[in-house]
Amino acid sequence: MTASYLPPKATIEESCHWLASNTGELWTLPRLLEHGLTPWLWLDYQEGHPELFGNRVEGFSAPVSFAGDLQRLSADCHHVVLTMTCTPDGRLFRLCPGIEFPADRLRFLRDDIQRLAGKFSATAAAPSGAPEVTPDDWKVAARAIADEMHEKDIRAGAYDSITNIAERVAAVMRTKNIHGPRGPLRGNTIAREALQGGKWKRKS
């Protein structure tokens, strides 16, 4: 049985429950982050940071997309320390010092959650007699994951470094059990051997 309703902006609990019902797997906040889901946070107007809001006098929904903020959140699932985000007009903005919020204020977008569930459905439907992968197939997988992350970052108005993206890709590949010829992959290996040329060369 699958959960039929998912709000447009779901809490952590709603996201994990819906994904568990639709994929048959256990979901937690760190796992959502490992799979590249972007958490969003409603920011009320902050008198200490007027430049973040521009001409707005009301709050806005801000993405938590900076790799350092996400790593801290994955390690401590109860608090968010927002040190960088995207302004309503698309500018990357650094908060110094950061602003701390309880994690239960985070929300995930329904489209992102459903897209993630669809990937698991596609994996489950794959034929069992699939051909054996070649030694370089992990590079193709790494680039595909990195491209998706990069596009999502752009939509959110965030621009991560190639080093941070490679670390995020490594975390996703570990959850998917995608290894290189010598076992689990590290971010520096992915950056050096897979994310080369094209836009990745320009980002480095």
Image: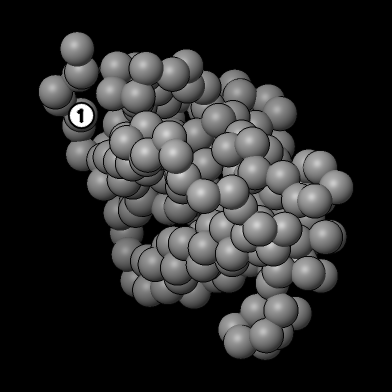
Decide which of 191, 123 is in the foreground and name it: 123
- Say which element carries label 1: loop
Task: Residue type at mark 1: give it.
Answer: Leu
State the residue at coordinates (81%, 42%).
183
Decide which of 113, 98 is in the foreground and name it: 113
State the residue at coordinates (64%, 36%).
177
- 175 up-or-down from 21: above or below: below
Kindly tell me whether residue 40 is visible in this rendering: yes
Q: Position of residue 141 (x, y in %)?
A: 57, 58
Q: Position of residue 158 (x, y in %)?
A: 53, 66
What is the quadrant of the C terminus in the image? bottom right
What is the quadrant of the N terminus in the image? top left
Q: Quadrant of residue 19?
A: top left
Q: Position of residue 144 (x, y in %)?
A: 52, 63
Kindly tell me whether residue 100 is visible in this rendering: no
Horizontal side, residue 5 vs residue 34: left or right: left
Decide which of 42, 70 is in the foreground and name it: 70
Q: Position of residue 74 (x, y in %)?
A: 65, 32
Q: Quadrant of residue 88?
A: bottom left
Check disc 1 and report the residue beneath it. 6
